[in-house]
């Protein structure tokens, strides 16, 4: 997320998420199938095969071949794939280690299906697919394992004749190919008013045979007789037995399909849509229910009773967007929305969808932020859901039709050329469930752990020997945005016309920078180069702990907030030390040239908490200059889309280190405010903007209704402070910034005792010195907002004392004072 001025960062710079920064001196060999797809030449497999304890190069890798070895008895011999080496840095990235280069450990192997015939005929049987390695006397051979998702996880079957197919599948950790003659095929499904007529082509189905459906959730079975019709046997399957009694959505029910002969023997039909797609979803005579004919990963059919969802028959790239077409027979009325939700819960993007039998959606690969700027979707996996607006409990995944499975993956690129173009891929999980993979801006060759260690330990020291360049490298919260005090320092340098090159750290193509500023991708080779060669480094949070300030280089630490909560070495808790934060801080802080302090109150605290022995400049915070000037609020309102006649309540709580998310990625929002009550009391003439802390990774439920705004991704919180009529916070340092405006501050301190006594501790008595009321309940907060003029008057003297103690230097000139001293060093 973009930076928040309330952040008090607890983690130093680290290698990208994709690079597991560990050194493993010895690892077992790798044999992995990354993708499997059927082409005109046959089955094409890409993957990785390399020793784990040595570099893998074109000459020394020892990679020999991929083979298919027959299993079971018989005189069949192993068959070799046509195999070639390939150089892909993803092989090194997938290994997750820093010691060995495995780029040449990638391969592509192709097998013509006819190679699996015997005497020119197909014979049933399984084949094990293996790769072999050889280097000197070392020999290794292993079956190809699954690699994450998509075609490498759920490969498609392939028809090689009217009744024969080859089915790739994974069993006991290895890839197998099954050649089989299919004795029964489901070839047609058409609807009448109250039933589904199925067409089945099958051998040896005597008179009296039946189509049988067995319920997975109970012992219930349904059987219907088979007749004879055009194209083979027919079965009329009434809809009535599938209707679930009761109103509202139900858990999905599953029915497996087989054919039952009079002698009790059975055969399972394979779903065969080679003559055309089979009708998939059929509305039932009950609200919210459809009968869905599903193709399982092994090609067999299954009937499911579920809520209707999108069934995609067409998936294609269209510019920097995806075109999704298909059917969506959702029952009911009202608007629909297509929801993309990050798999770790850190984001949600919604798109309106027209209700109707047909589905046609142009899905952009970007998300429009609360400031109106479009940015590429954040890196990671995004899951799809289709749902009626306002009814998230009825949401359903997007299912890929059998005829569209082979078109995946489909990719587009998004983002600016300067900040980095991102590849976004539509892929599939669980065989036919659509997902989106937003890949990192850094290439695999740049981001893997092996490359990152060499950039840090070799490239960075080498670059430190180059001449310093007259340039400034700015960093706000490790590349999150153009904001905070570094933004103000940059503006002041530009105003003076300083002869300097300006570089800005940008992570994941998520920040927009102004003209004249060159973006630098976080953790890229040019980032390491800039850290080593720029004369000035200006940042508001931690620099990487490997930096060494060189002679003539100036490192300006602006930090990012005045101080109520205890920080760094002043925190009376082991959690910071246990996380390695304090050790990293102690390596970093001696390399600061200048530490910026916002006030006389903060100066001794910063020196003690950071154990910093260098120069502290007591200048005020550059980022508060814009608040002292008080210009630009109307433009911010316009970007947010807030009507001019509405009062803006900005709620900006801090984070709680004891509310970490279950997956370990960030912290929970834990919204204690009763939004419904606030909307009922204030919605007529107020809007509520919620600015969660930068450590919080959780979307705001219900935002976008005209009253509640999620502004967590707004690039610069100072602009939000400019526009806000009143601030609601708790223990966040944002209170010190907003006090510069002189506007009201309310404190929603529902957990004051726990936060103060158990989590962080305070540098002063908030209850005695707060420039506004401390409110313990949501009802008290809403009431105070309704009586704001009177509440403000009650705390006017406390507000005056607070500003005198903490805002005396916020006169609009802090940026100039910082730049004066920075250039003089």
Image: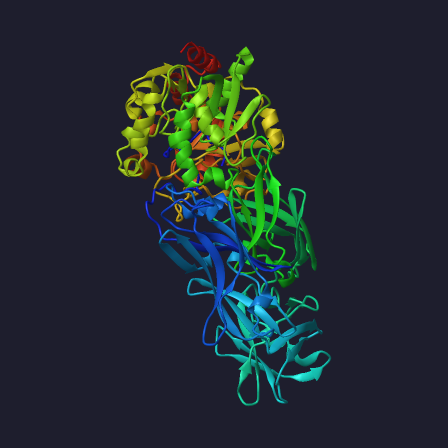
Q: In this view, does 66 lie above or below 60?
A: below
Q: Where residue 410 sits in the image (x, y, percent)?
A: 61, 50
In this orientation, which residue lies closer to the viewer: 309 or 118? Answer: 118
Whether residue 213 sits left or right of residue 616 in the image: it is right
Q: How many marks?
A: 0
Is residue 299 visible in the rendered structure shown here? no
Nearer to me, 547 or 218: 547
Query: Which residue: 33% across, 37% down?
Result: 755
Rendered position, 204 above or below 95: below
Farthest-out residue, right = 230
**Colour mapping used in the image:** rainbow
The image shows residue 816 at horizontal and vertical percentages of 47, 12
Name the image quarter holding the C terminus.
top left
Question: In the shown orientation, is residue 17 left or right of residue 111?
Answer: left
Q: Is residue 698 left or right of residue 396?
A: left
**What is the x, y in percent for residue 6?**
43, 30
Vertical side of 223 occupied by 706: above or below:
above
Q: Which of 50 and 58 is in front in this view?
A: 58
* Residue under the point 26% across and 37% down: 574
Dividing the picture into quadrants, the one containing residue 747 is top left
Q: Can the viewer see residue 568 in this picture?
A: yes
Find residue 629 and report its horizontal and vertical position in percent. Answer: 53, 17
Looking at the image, residue 131 sits to the left or right of residue 113; the answer is left
Q: Is residue 223 above or below residue 33?
A: below
């Amino acid at each position: 997320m973009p930076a928040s001025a309330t952040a008090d960062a607890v983690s130093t710079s680290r290698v990208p998420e994709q690079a597991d920064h560990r050194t493993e001196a010895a690892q077992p060999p790798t044999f992995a199938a990354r993708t499997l797809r059927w082409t005109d030449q046959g089955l094409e497999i890409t993957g990785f095969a390399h020793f784990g304890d040595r570099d893998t190069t074109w000459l020394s890798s020892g990679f020999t071949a991929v083979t298919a070895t027959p299993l079971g008895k018989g005189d069949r011999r192993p068959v070799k794939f046509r195999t070639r080496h390939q150089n892909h840095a993803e092989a090194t990235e997938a290994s997750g280690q820093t010691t060995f280069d495995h780029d040449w450990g990638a391969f592509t192997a192709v097998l013509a299906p006819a190679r699996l015939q015997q005497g020119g005929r197909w014979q049933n049987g399984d084949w094990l697919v293996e790769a072999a390695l050889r280097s000197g006397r070392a020999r290794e051979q292993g079956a190809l394992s699954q690699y994450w998702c998509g075609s490498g996880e759920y490969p498609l079957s392939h028809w090689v004749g009217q009744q024969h197919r080859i089915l790739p599948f994974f069993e006991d950790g290895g890839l197998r190919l099954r050649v089989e003659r299919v004795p029964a095929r489901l070839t047609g499904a058409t609807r009448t008013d109250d039933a589904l007529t199925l067409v089945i082509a099958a051998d040896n189905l005597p008179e009296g045979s039946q189509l049988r459906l067995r319920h997975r959730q109970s012992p219930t079975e349904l059987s219907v007789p088979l007749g004879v019709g055009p194209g083979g046997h027919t079965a009329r399957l009434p809809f009535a037995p599938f209707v679930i009694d009761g109103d509202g959505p139900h858990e999905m029910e599953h029915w497996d399909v087989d054919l039952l002969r009079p002698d009790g023997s059975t055969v399972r039909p394979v779903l065969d849509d080679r003559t055309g797609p089979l009708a998939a979803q059929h509305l039932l005579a009950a609200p919210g229910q459809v009968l869905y004919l599903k193709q399982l990963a092994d090609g067999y059919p299954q009937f499911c009773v579920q809520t209707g969802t999108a069934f995609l028959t067409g998936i294609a790239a269209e510019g920097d967007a995806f075109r999704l077409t298909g059917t969506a027979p959702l029952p009911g009325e009202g608007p629909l929305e297509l929801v993309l939700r990050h798999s770790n819960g850190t984001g949600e993007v919604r798109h309106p969808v027209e209700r109707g039998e047909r589905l046609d959606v142009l899905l952009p690969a970007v998300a429009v932020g609360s400031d109106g700027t479009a940015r590429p979707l954040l890196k990671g996996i995004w899951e799809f859901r289709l749902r009626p607006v306002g009814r998230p409990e009825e949401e359903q995944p997007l299912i890929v039709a059998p005829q569209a499975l082979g078109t995946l993956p489909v990719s587009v690129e998004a983002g600016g050329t300067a900040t980095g173009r991102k590849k976004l891929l539509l892929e599939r999980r669980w065989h036919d469930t659509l997902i989106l993979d937003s890949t990192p801006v850094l290439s695999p060759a740049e981001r893997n752990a092996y490359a990152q260690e060499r950039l840090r330990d070799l490239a960075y020291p080498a670059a430190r020997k180059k001449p310093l360049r007259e340039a400034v490298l700015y960093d706000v919260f490790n590349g999150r945005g153009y904001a905070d005090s570094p933004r103000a320092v940059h503006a002041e340098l530009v105003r003076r016309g300083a002869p300097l090159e300006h570089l800005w750290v940008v992570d994941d193509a998520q920040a927009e920078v102004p003209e004249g500023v060159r973006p630098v991708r976080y953790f890229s080779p040019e980032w390491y180069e800039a850290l080593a060669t720029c004369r000035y480094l200006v940042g508001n949070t931690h620099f990487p702990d490997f930096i060494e300030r060189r002679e003539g280089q100036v490192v300006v630490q602006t930090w990012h907030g005045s101080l109520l909560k205890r920080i760094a070495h002043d925190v009376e808790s082991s959690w910071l030390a246990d996380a390695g934060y304090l050790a990293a801080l102690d390596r970093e802080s001696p390399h600061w040239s200048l530490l910026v302090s916002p006030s006389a109150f903060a100066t001794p605290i910063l020196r003690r908490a950071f154990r910093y022995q260098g120069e502290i400049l007591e200048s005020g915070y550059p980022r508060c200059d814009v608040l002292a000037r008080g210009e630009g609020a109307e433009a911010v309102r316009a970007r947010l889309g807030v009507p001019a006649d509405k009062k803006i309540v900005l709620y900006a709580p801090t984070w709680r280190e004891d509310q970490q998310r279950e997956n370990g990625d960030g912290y929970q929002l834990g919204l204690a405010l009763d939004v419904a009550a606030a909307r009922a009391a204030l919605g007529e003439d107020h809007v509520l903007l919620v600015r969660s802390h930068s450590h919080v990774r959780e979307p705001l439920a219900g935002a976008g209704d005209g009253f509640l705004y999620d502004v967590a991704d707004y690039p610069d919180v100072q602009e939000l402070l400019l526009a806000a009529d009143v601030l609601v916070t708790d223990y966040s340092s944002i209170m010190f910034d907003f006090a510069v405006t002189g506007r009201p501050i309310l404190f929603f301190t529902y957990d004051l005792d726990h936060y103060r006594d158990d989590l962080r501790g305070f540098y002063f008595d908030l209850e005695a010195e707060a420039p506004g009321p401390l409110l313990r309940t949501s009802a008290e907060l809403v009431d105070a907002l309704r009586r704001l003029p009177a509440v403000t008057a009650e705390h006017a003297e406390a507000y005056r004392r607070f500003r005198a103690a903490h805002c005396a230097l916020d006169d609009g000139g802090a940026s100039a004072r910082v730049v004066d001293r920075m250039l003089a060093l």
